[in-house]
């Protein structure tokens, strides 16, 4: 989670000081919208990284996960989808 969430979030936090430094030194002019979009994009990427970090962890305490967690992500994401589908089916049955 530190890599997939921390790196984009740290870069998102550094967007404003870095853009100030670029404009202050007169290297080139940055429109405000570019700075805001870059910052929001990096924070959004950090949120996706946080979600990936949660889903790529091994939820079985007796099984060690892999380094990137792709196998665990597929398993855990499948569990989440199955749970959501079961909830939707139960909710539609109760509505009838």
Image (tube, rainbow, N blue to C red):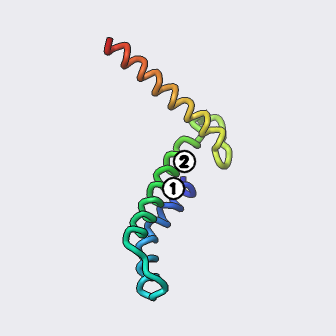
In the displayed structure image, the side of residue 5 where residue 61 appears, left or right? right
Residues 85 and 71: in front is: 85
**Which quadrant would residue 77 be assigned to in this image?**
top right
Residue furthest left in the image: 95
Q: Position of residue 50 (x, y in %)?
A: 49, 50
Instruction: Name which of mark 1 and mark 2 comes first in the sequence.
Output: 1
In the rendered image, which quarter contains the C terminus? Answer: top left
Q: Helix or strand or loop: what does disc 1 sit on?
A: helix
Task: From this view, report whether residue 42 is shown above or below residue 81.
Answer: below
Horizontally, is 22 left or right of 78 in the view?
left
- Residue 63: image quadrant is top right
Q: Residue furthest bottom?
A: 25
Q: In this rendering, is residue 86 above or below 60?
A: above
- What residue is rendered at 42% in x and 63% in y? 37
Q: Which residue is identified by label 2?
A: 53
- Between 29 and 20, the one lying in front of the other is 29
Residue indicated by mark 1:
5
Q: Quadrant of residue 38?
A: bottom left
Marks 1 and 2, how far apart at CA = 8 Å
Vertical comparison of 7 with 54: above or below: below
Tell me which residue sits at (36%, 19%) in the image.
91
């Amino acid at each position: 989670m530190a890599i997939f969430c921390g790196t984009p979030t740290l870069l998102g936090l550094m967007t404003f000081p870095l853009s100030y430094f670029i404009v202050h030194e007169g290297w080139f002019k940055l429109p405000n919208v570019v700075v805001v979009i870059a910052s929001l994009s990096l924070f959004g990427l950090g949120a996706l990284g946080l979600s990936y970090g949660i889903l790529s962890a091994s939820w079985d305490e007796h099984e060690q996960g892999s380094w990137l967690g792709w196998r665990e992500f597929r398993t855990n994401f499948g569990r989440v989808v199955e749970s959501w589908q079961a909830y939707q089916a139960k909710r539609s049955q109760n509505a009838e």
